């Protein structure tokens, strides 16, 4: 590990305009998908982004890898701000950051052989033009992710979901990237297959010294995989902490509610724990609530404070960084959260 | 008499590629007010068996169905289409995984609920609408009187699933089949829906069959659990037994391959190697043997029955290993051993050589 973060994200904003009209498209509003998030990614770590659908975690992932252009803010990678960089500046950097997508069915071209799919990064970046050598490279990659190298000429439909996800991983590590952004890499897979892919990602991280941004909605999976975790709600980070800190003592009421909502495969614990059920749904990101965005659903809401004064991200007891005026106390945590330190 | 009694149910689909044995001899019973969880991965037959209970697979010309499904003493497999129509949505109702594709996008919620009620009850439109409003209120939709006039797209995913539940319960069913009811939902919404299902079960005394791949969900909601693999039930027991002392290697695999919030962090995941078999060419012997770390020569030839565990008639397992060996293996696994070590310590390797 080197000193200083690999990536510094500051005040990152992405608004998707909503337009009306056919000829003269007038902007009538914006989906505030990501609204001012700042965090660092340290080399060699696994950073988890969690939150429910619509919280902006996938958009953040696509912004970091510059598959989307940010509305404002900066993303400094190795000293270069890539937020507004053009294609030519980005091309060499793209080798260093790769993505693994959620759906192994739609993220692989059904007409191309596995060999071509995994070899495509070499093609794009003009590496190893010699056909035989490239074939050997690809087959080594296949071996590395646990695929049979003899299946080089097969098409994606001949593989199961788990094997397809291995193809996606092989493609992502082909150029020996520094950073892998994995967006829900196991949520489309069956339970018995999930563990295979999670273990593969961990082993590869150890072997190749990868930095991973791991996005998932499954809090048990995130806890297993990540060193540090950022919880997002409606386009903002509401809490950030080391994994143990977050699961032992979540300070933001939203993190607490998320953890409390996870069904635990242990009937005894399930009976003891008081599941805290949040009321209502996530508000629309086109018109998010004022001040603290969670105040409409928060069990600790204080009128006249939470809906007026936006809380800043600051360090709370136990070392968690959370944006809340009334963070959870240890008693509240013990009653609701299954992972709370007893 | 149990409310639902499924016996030796087989559903085979005759396709061009061969016979798909989707469900291959499944038996279970559900008492009224009781909740049964059916756990399995995709292709284990858990959905097909429940669709068959609802009489929804009979329309496939390729399907060959045998065995019996008795509901309140009546055999549903031999019931006429007309009789099934009267039972479906009335005495037995079902909620599906994807609430958006289960609601008609062109009709208002109220109209769809009224239709569901009027097709089984001889009531006026106004009465049916009142009942709809009452049901929407019961499942926690705010301002139900106003929301009956909304279209499905005006509801969020969680709200749509509530509408589906309201519709399913509108005619006071005795049995509710829920097929992955929360899989498409976020965790906080999932918690709301599970809470709702549990509350309704205790208030209305409805029996529930909950189909899911999520062991956490069954641990919270059900009383008894059946684990399915390749069209068969491989283990069945009260839920505390399934989690505390499971005896089938596949159940162990499921429990050990998911990261769990209730265990210390950093626990190694032990995946089940390989993948589920093709239902057309099932392996000989025990269907699980190609993936089982404790397989022995005999298991490749002999197909195990679902037998009760000695000393516990509520707990049955489809496995050729002796119950004592299984108990020893599970203890070793819980001590943190990996399957190979457990196999060695439990003396399986030595036995293999001897025999």
Image: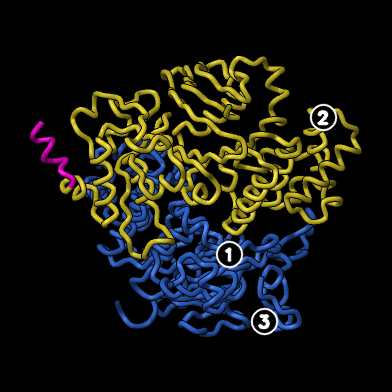
Q: How far apart are the alpha carbons under marks 1 and 2?
A: 46 Å
Colour of the chain lettered B: yellow
Residue at left 27%, top 41%?
Answer: B326
Find disc 2 in the rendering and name its residue.
Answer: B121
Region in magenta: B346-355
Of circles 3 and 2, the one toward us is 2
Question: Is label 1 in contact with label 3 (beta carbons under 8 Å)?
Answer: no
Question: Dot 2 falls on which chain?
Answer: B
Name the residue at 38% across, 50% down. B244
Image mark for residue A56: 1
Instruction: Judge if badges 1 and 3 mark residues of a common chain.
Output: yes
* Residue A237 position within the rendered picture, expressed as x and y whole percent measured from the top left: 56, 73
Residue A206 placement (x, y as % from top left): 27, 64
Label 2 packing within 10 angstroms: few (<14), some (14-19), many (20+) = few
First in sequence: mark 1 vs mark 3: 1
Which corner quadrant holds the N terminus of chain A?
A: bottom left
Q: Main secondary structure of the magenta part?
A: helix
Helix, strand or loop for disc 2: loop
Do we see residue B236 in this rendering? yes
Does residue A12 appear in the picture of this structure? Answer: no
Please tell me which residue is depicted at 56% across the width and 22% down the height of the picture: B69
Q: Which chain is blue?
A: A
């Amino acid at each position: 590990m080197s000193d200083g973060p690999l990536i510094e994200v500051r005040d990152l904003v992405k608004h998707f305009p909503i337009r009306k009209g056919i000829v003269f498209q007038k902007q009538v509003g914006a989906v505030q998908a990501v609204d001012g998030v700042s965090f660092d990614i340290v080399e060699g770590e696994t950073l988890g982004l969690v939150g429910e659908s619509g919280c902006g975690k996938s958009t953040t992932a696509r912004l970091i890898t510059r598959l989307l252009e940010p509305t404002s803010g900066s993303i400094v990678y190795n000293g270069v701000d890539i937020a507004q960089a053009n294609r030519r500046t980005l091309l060499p950097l793209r080798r260093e950051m790769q993505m693994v997508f959620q759906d192994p069915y739609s993220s692989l071209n059904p007409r191309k052989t596995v060999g071509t799919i995994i070899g495509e990064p070499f093609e794009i970046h003009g590496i190893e033009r010699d056909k035989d050598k490239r074939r050997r490279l690809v087959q080594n990659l296949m071996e590395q992710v646990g695929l049979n190298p003899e299946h080089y000429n097969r098409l994606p439909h001949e593989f199961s979901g788990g094997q397809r996800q291995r193809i996606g991983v092989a493609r992502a590590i082909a150029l020996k990237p520094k950073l892998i952004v994995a967006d829900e890499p196991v949520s489309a897979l069956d339970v018995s297959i999930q563990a295979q892919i999670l273990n593969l990602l961990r082993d590869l991280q150890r072997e190749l010294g990868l930095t991973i941004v791991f996005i998932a909605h499954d809090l048990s999976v995130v806890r297993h995989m990540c060193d540090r975790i950022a919880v997002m709600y409606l386009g903002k980070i509401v809490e950030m902490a080391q994994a143990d800190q977050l699961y032992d003592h979540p300070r933001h009421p939203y993190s607490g509610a998320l953890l409390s909502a996870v069904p635990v495969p242990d009937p005894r614990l399930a009976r003891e724990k008081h599941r805290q059920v949040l009321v209502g749904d996530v508000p629309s990101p086109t018109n998010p609530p004022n001040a603290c965005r969670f105040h409409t659903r928060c069990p600790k809401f204080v009128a006249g404070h939470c809906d007026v004064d936006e809380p800043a991200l600051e360090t709370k007891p136990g070392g968690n960084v959370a944006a809340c005026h009334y963070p959870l106390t240890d008693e509240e945590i013990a009653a609701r959260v299954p992972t709370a330190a007893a | 008499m149990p409310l639902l009694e499924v016996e030796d149910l087989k559903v085979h689909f005759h396709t061009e590629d061969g016979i798909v044995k989707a469900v291959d001899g499944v038996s279970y019973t559900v008492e009224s007010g009781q909740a049964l969880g059916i756990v399995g991965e995709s292709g284990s037959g858990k959905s097909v068996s429940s669709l068959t209970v609802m009489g929804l697979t009979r329309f496939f010309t390729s399907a060959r169905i045998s065995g019996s499904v008795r509901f309140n003493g009546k055999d549903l497999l031999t019931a006429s289409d007309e009789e099934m129509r009267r039972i479906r949505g009335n005495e037995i109702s079902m909620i599906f995984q994807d609430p958006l594709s289960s609601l008609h996008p062109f009709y208002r919620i109220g109209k769809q609920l009224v239709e569901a009620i009027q097709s089984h009850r001889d009531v006026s439109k106004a009465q049916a609408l009142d009942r709809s409003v009452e049901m929407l209120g019961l499942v926690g939709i705010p301002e139900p009187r106003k929301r009956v006039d909304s279209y499905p797209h005006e509801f969020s995913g969680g709200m749509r699933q509530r509408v589906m539940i309201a519709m399913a319960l509108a005619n006071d069913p005795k049995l509710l089949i829920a097929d992955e009811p929360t899989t498409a939902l976020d965790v906080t919404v999932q918690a709301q829906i599970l809470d709702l299902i549990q509350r309704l079960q205790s208030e209305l005394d409805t029996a529930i069959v909950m189909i899911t791949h999520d062991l956490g969900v069954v641990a919270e909601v059900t009383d008894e659990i059946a684990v399915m693999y390749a069209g068969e039930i491989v283990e069945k027991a009260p839920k505390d037994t399934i989690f505390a002392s499971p005896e089938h290697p596949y159940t162990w695999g499921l429990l050990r391959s998911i990261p769990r919030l209730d265990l210390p962090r950093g626990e190694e995941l032990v995946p089940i190697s390989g993948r589920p078999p093709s239902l057309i060419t099932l392996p000989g012997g025990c269907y699980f043997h190609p993936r089982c770390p404790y397989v022995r020569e005999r298991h490749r030839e002999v197909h195990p029955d679902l037998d009760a565990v000695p000393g516990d008639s509520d707990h049955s397992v489809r496995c050729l290993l002796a119950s004592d060996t299984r108990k020893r293996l599970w203890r070793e696994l819980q001590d943190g051993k990996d399957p190979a070590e457990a196999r060695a310590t439990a003396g399986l390797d030595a036995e293999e050589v001897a025999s």
